[in-house]
């Protein structure tokens, strides 16, 4: 900001000194929130010392009397209440032949004044914060700025700023008291880098899952300690990017919310794929065993199972992957970190679905045999019913997550492709004698093929009806 102001307002004036060289730097420290640069123009007998930092730190370097210090504090608070980032600035001279002082306090600084820097929030930040809050994600602000600046910016972002803790407050709190205050305080001001690490560790000790953003070298320990360190890609240092797990290429907080939404969508889609995979393999297992137990000819051969897997695999890897996400995905509380991908209720529902489909297909097979249908055609009709139920189960799995209308009536293009290819292949297996014989079947008539198709779909529709009844 200083360089930009100088370039736009002080160009071609005597106030700019491009020929000066930096000879020494005193860095910001937790003990003194100020930094100083020593500059030399190559001919003058002295160095020019420029200092900037927290107003109270610069006032201390200038050894201002209590009355002036209070005036500085009041003016800094007034500027901070406007949301400005407030810095104090001072200057000093140091003879070039003298040794450099060990600390900044050894310079004879002259107070210059206060500088207010406007760093407005991006327009999308308040909405991003609201989305986090609706999703059960708590947004905590840690900054080295003045408490009033922090409060004002937090209020603009939509963060509860009724209570603000400073770095000095943190130093006075015992671990138990800090843990208690972390339950209600969302804004921390005048925080040193080491205190950011302390806050991350304290939040983790409370059982929170912590994502931490940062861009500076001093932020690296806190970024590393957080469950998810997020570094800024544009203004972030190499050290911060190396310590982080994620790098924001656009330095935009809203991108974090987009990443959370994407992560939740992927997780929800994985759960749907797992439920479908478990449910669809239950009838394969049962229909391989039941004929043996009942003394009937084998219903499923290896080639049949291979055909089914050719339907199952693209359904899991393409159909569910392309899901847009469940309604209200960003209005659900975060899941526990220890929660497994497939919970017991999901497994129970999948086993129940698979068992009902298996019974429906077995009923088709037994009924066909009872009506005197030749064994080759009975197996073909049962196989058609099983594949149809498999395809319908995709819609049921989506309906359980997104509602029956979305699951049954609004199919994404990729699901239509999978269904179309499956039906064409199934028609070839069931209706065309050369292909049917490869599967150990006898070709079906069109009515028999359609009856098997309808029976398979009806078994899944029955599941949807039973599921709706159980919820009422």
Image (tube, grey):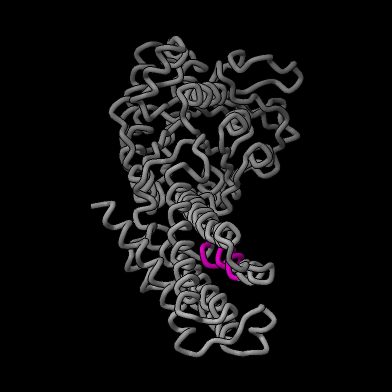
The mark tally for this picture is: 0
Residue 269: image x %, image y %?
49, 56
Question: Which residue is painted at 36% across and 39% down in the image?
Answer: 153
The vertical placement of 39 against 66, above or below, is below
Residue 465: image x %, image y %?
30, 62
> Is 93 colored magenta in this rendering?
no
Camera-side residue: 188 or 387? 387
Question: Which residue is painted at 66% across and 21% down in the image?
Answer: 94
> Is 316 colored magenta in this rendering?
yes
Camera-side residue: 195 or 322? 322
Q: Can residue 258 be seen in the rendering of this structure?
A: no
Q: Quadrant of residue 108?
A: top right
The vertical placement of 450 against 418, above or below, is below
- Residue sitting farthest toward the left: 472
Residue 73: image x %, image y %?
36, 22
Q: Can residue 96 be seen in the rendering of this structure?
A: yes
Residue 468: image x %, image y %?
29, 58
The vertical placement of 302 against 147, above or below, is below
Camera-side residue: 348 or 165? 348
Q: Quadrant of residue 430?
A: bottom right
Question: Which residue is painted at 45% across and 84% down in the image?
Answer: 450
From the viewer's perspective, tell me whether residue 370 is left or right of residue 236.
left
Magenta-drawn stretch, dominant element (helix, strand or loop): helix
Question: Which residue is painted at 40% across and 12% down in the image?
Answer: 177
Q: Quadrant of residue 291?
A: bottom right
Residue interval drawn in magenta: 311-320
Camera-side residue: 21 or 391? 391
């Amino acid at each position: 900001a200083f360089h930009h102001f100088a370039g736009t307002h002080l160009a071609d004036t005597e106030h700019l000194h491009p020929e000066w060289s930096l000879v020494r730097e005193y860095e910001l420290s937790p003990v003194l929130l100020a930094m100083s640069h020593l500059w030399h123009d190559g001919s003058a007998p002295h160095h020019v010392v420029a200092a900037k930092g927290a107003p109270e730190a610069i006032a201390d370097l200038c050894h201002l009397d209590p009355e002036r210090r209070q005036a500085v504090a009041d003016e800094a608070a007034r500027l901070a209440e406007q949301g400005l980032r407030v810095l104090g600035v001072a200057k000093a001279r140091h003879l070039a032949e003298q040794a450099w002082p060990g600390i900044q306090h050894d310079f004879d600084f002259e107070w210059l004044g206060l500088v207010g820097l406007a760093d407005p929030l991006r327009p999308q930040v308040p909405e991003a914060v609201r989305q986090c809050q609706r999703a059960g994600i708590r947004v905590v602000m840690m900054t080295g700025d003045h408490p009033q600046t922090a409060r004002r910016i937090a209020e603009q972002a939509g963060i509860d700023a009724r209570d603000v803790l400073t770095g000095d407050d943190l130093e006075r709190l015992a671990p138990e008291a800090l843990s208690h205050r972390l339950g209600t305080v969302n804004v921390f001001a005048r925080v040193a880098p080491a205190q950011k690490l302390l806050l991350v560790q304290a939040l983790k000790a409370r059982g929170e899952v912590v994502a931490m953003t940062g861009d500076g070298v001093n932020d690296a320990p806190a970024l590393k300690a957080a469950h998810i360190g997020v570094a800024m890609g544009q203004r972030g240092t190499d050290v911060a990017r190396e310590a982080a797990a994620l790098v924001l290429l656009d330095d935009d907080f809203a991108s974090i919310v987009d990443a959370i939404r994407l992560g939740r969508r992927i997780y929800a889609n994985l759960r749907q794929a797992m439920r479908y995979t478990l449910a669809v393999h239950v009838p394969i297992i049962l229909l391989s065993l039941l004929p043996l137990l009942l003394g009937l000819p084998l219903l499923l051969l290896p080639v049949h199972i291979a055909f089914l897997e050719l339907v199952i695999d693209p359904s899991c890897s393409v159909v569910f992957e392309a899901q847009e996400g469940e309604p209200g995905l960003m209005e659900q509380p975060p899941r526990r970190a220890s929660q497994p991908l497939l919970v017991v209720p999901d497994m129970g529902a999948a086993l129940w679905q698979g068992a009902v489909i298996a019974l429906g297909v077995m009923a088709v097979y037994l009924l066909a045999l009872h009506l005197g249908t030749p064994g080759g055609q009975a197996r073909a009709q049962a196989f058609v019913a099983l594949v149809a139920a498999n395809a319908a189960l995709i819609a049921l799995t989506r309906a359980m997550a997104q509602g029956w209308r979305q699951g049954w009536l609004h199919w994404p293009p990729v699901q239509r492709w999978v269904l179309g290819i499956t039906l064409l292949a199934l028609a070839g297996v069931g209706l065309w004698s050369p292909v049917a014989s490869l599967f150990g079947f006898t070709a079906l008539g069109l009515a028999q093929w359609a009856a098997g198709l309808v029976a398979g779909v009806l078994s899944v529709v029955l599941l949807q009806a039973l599921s709706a009844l159980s919820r009422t």
